[in-house]
């Protein structure tokens, strides 16, 4: 019997790798986070590179607007990014405390 290859639940099905840029302020702010939160942020960036802007497996993921998204790295820490349709560039514009998040 011929079986189809399994398809990952999340992922970029076009084989395109996204380019993730991180604003300087986001980098500065995430450096204030505990090491485990910094590691979660690194994993998020890796997920954005390989899977694109939709990260619905991350806690509290949601679209903030037509081109903006966010998720929680932890209860007190969030990341926000933007992605224009048809672009391979994703820009992380905020990574820091939930209390100071720009939404």
Image (cartoon, rainbow, N blue to C red):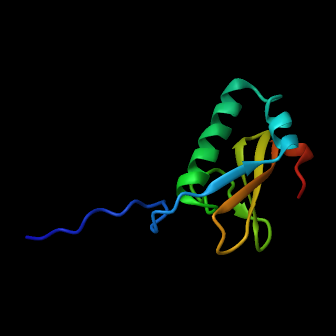
Q: Is residue 9 left or right of residue 53?
A: left
Q: How many marks?
A: 0
In-image side of 63 versus 53 (left or right): right
Give 31 or 72, whichever is nearer the viewer: 31
Name the residue rendered at 73%, 70% in the picture: 84
Front residue of 76/91: it is 91
The single residue placed furthest to the left in the displayed view is 1
Decide which of 16, 3 is in the foreground and name it.
Answer: 16
Percent coordinates x, y for residue 97 in the rendering: 85, 40
What is the x, y in percent for residue 64?
Answer: 79, 66
In the image, is residue 87 above or below residue 80? below
* Residue 97 visible (yes or no): no
Residue 60 lies in what quarter of the image? bottom right
Q: Quadrant of the C terminus?
A: bottom right
Q: Quadrant of residue 62?
A: bottom right
Task: State the residue at coordinates (43%, 61%).
Answer: 9
From the top left corner, tell me how far across and down residue 78 is, in percent.
Answer: 77, 46
Q: Is residue 43 above or below residue 2?
A: above
| Residue in view at x 76 percent, y 70 percent | 67
Vertical position of residue 29 compared to residue 9: above or below? above
Image-quadrant location for residue 96:
top right
Q: Is residue 44 visible to the viewer in this orientation of the structure?
A: yes
């Amino acid at each position: 019997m011929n079986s189809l290859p399994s398809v990952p639940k999340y992922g970029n099905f076009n084989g395109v790798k996204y380019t993730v840029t991180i604003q300087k302020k986001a980098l500065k702010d995430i450096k204030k986070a505990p090491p485990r939160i910094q590691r979660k942020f690194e994993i998020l960036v890796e997920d954005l590179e390989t899977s694109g802007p939709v990260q619905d497996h991350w806690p509290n993921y949601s679209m903030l607007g037509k081109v903006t998204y966010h998720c929680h790295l932890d209860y007190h820490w969030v990341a926000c990014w933007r992605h224009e349709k048809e672009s391979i560039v994703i820009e992380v514009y905020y990574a820091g405390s939930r209390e100071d998040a720009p939404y």
